[in-house]
Every structure is written in C-alpha cells, then in structure tokens.
Amino acid sequence: MDNSILDELIDSSHFIDNSLKKKCKEYFEQIPKGIGTWFYSSSIPPFVYQGDIIDKLDVIYLQVTDGDRQIQLLEDMPCVLLSNTCDLYFREKTREKYISIAPLFSFDEFAENKYPEYSKEGWENFLAE
C-alpha cells in the first residue's frame, strides 16, 4: 500500500488518538514494502480473523438495571473480532459456534459521557490511565 494512502487512513481514523497518529505512521513505515493488500483488503475475504474490524454490525446485549433485564441494540456498530482465529473453525470441534466481539467507538465521545458513579476527579483519573 502506498504510504500516502496509509497516512490518509490514519489521519482520518476516529479510532487512533490524535496524539498517537504520528507514531502510528512511523511504525507502519518500518513494515517491509511489497506485501500487497494485507492491511486493507480490496475485497471481502472468505474468512475472518482475530483482530479484524467488522463495519456495521448489529450488537445485541442484555442490560440489567435494578434486577430488570432489558435487551439493548446498537445498530451499525463497528466491532473488532476478539476470538482467536483457531476458534473460528468449527469442524470436528465440540464448542458452540459463538465468537467474541467488542464494539469500537471514539475515545473522545466516550470521555464526554461521564458516568455518574465517578467524581469529576475520579473520571479524569480513569481516562488518564
């Protein structure tokens, strides 16, 4: 991949903190050239792998509030695949066909939504860690 395209992807990313974008570019410049489309695929691969980011996935989860269980839905959420790649192949395995994912969201948006359980100082300390 051309470095200018990679730089553009890093600069436009909402998932990479602005203070780390320069360092991110430096790390990618260390990768040997000529490895083709390993970083950003021009087509949808037949298999997914650990660490892949899946765009626009509907995430359904159970939220419990004061003993009341409610099903919640996040629509069109980008997610990262957490399951080990070897867990994704189910032939001759006894485990169920479930995978682990985690929604991705902007750190800035997350930081703006202070949780009431935290004091102002506690929230700032939590974000700084």
Image (cartoon, grey):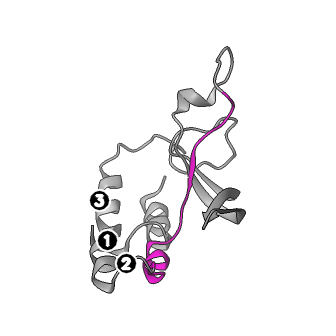
Front in this rendered view, residue 27 or 77 = 77
Of the residues shown, which amino acid type is indicated by label 2?
Tyr
Residue 26 versus residue 92 in the image, above or below: below
The numbered mark at residue 118 is 2
Q: Is residue 27 left or right of residue 53?
A: left
Q: Which residue is mark 3?
A: 26
C-alpha span from label 3 to label 2: 36 Å
In magenta, the rendered stretch is 96-115
- Give the label, 3 or 2, closer to the camera: 2
The answer to whether the residues at label 3 and label 1 have Cβ atoms under 8 Å apart is no
Give the structural element (helix, strand or loop) at label 3. Answer: helix
Q: Amino acid at mark 3?
A: Glu
Helix, strand or loop at label 1? It is helix
Dot 2 or dot 1: first in sequence order is: 2
In this rendering, position of residue 21 left or right of residue 55: left
Q: Label 3 vs label 1: CA separation?
A: 28 Å
Residue type at mark 1: give it.
Phe
Reply above or below: 48 against 55: above
